[in-house]
Amino acid sequence: MSRRSVLLGMLALVASGAPMAEILPANARDLQAYCARAGDDDRTRPIPASVVAAARRVFGSSADEPAALMRKSTVYRCMSGEIWLCNYGANLSCGKADASRTSTGAAAFCKQNPSAESVPMAATGHDTIYEWKCVGGQPQIVEQIQKLDPRGFISDNWKRLEQ
């Protein structure tokens, strides 16, 4: 295969609009610039190593907590041009919230526990924004217990990274 045909093939790929490998920001300054350009990007990604110290401050973590653990348990996304962080912690959801007014997990739980005063999050999922109970074997919303941010994530789980 000639060099010319390889170059023509690459140009055809670019012209076709096929996605190229995404280059993720490697440091806090690049990440800040990326979010400023992106505005809103709901994809959650692991934080770069350069953001670990700031993430520790945001979440009140000890400086002794291993950087590898902080990177493994903390993700970022961009909202309104700002960097937002979420640390999975104990049963926290960093993905988009489940705002559905139906729950297959609650329905299955209520079939087995028709008068349960509360449906555990193990059944509904930790991303639900509602508290559920069972009435006559059917799931029923008690109240909304989580607030959503403008992008549909549980607002209490996300903290803005101030530079």
Image (cartoon, rainbow, N blue to C red):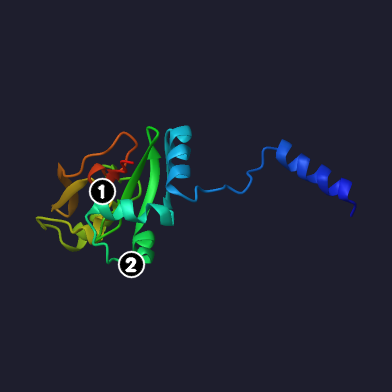
Q: Are marks 2 and 1 in contact (CB under 8 Å)?
A: no
User: Which x, y percent locates residue 46?
Assistant: 42, 55
First in sequence: mark 2 vs mark 1:
2
For residue 6, the mark is none
Residue at the disc numbered 2: 66
What residue is drawn where x is 77% and y is 40%? 11
> Is 14 situated left or right of 118 in this image?
right
- In the displayed structure, 12 sits above or below 2; it is above
Instruction: Give the label, 2 or 1, closer to the camera.
Output: 2
What residue is drawn where x is 73% and y is 42%? 13
Given residues 162 and 118, the one toward you in this image is: 162
Kind of residue at disc 2? Pro
Given residues 127 and 22, the one toward you in this image is: 22
> Is 30 situated left or right of 69 in this image?
right
Which quadrant of the rendered structure holds the N terminus? bottom right
Residue at the disc numbered 1: 157
What residue is drawn where x is 66% and y is 42%? 18
Q: Is residue 47 visible?
A: no
Dot 1, crowdedness within 10 Å: few (<14), some or many (≥20)? many
User: Which x, y percent locates residue 23?
Assistant: 56, 48
Q: Is residue 131 visible?
A: yes
User: Which x, y percent locates residue 61?
Assistant: 24, 59
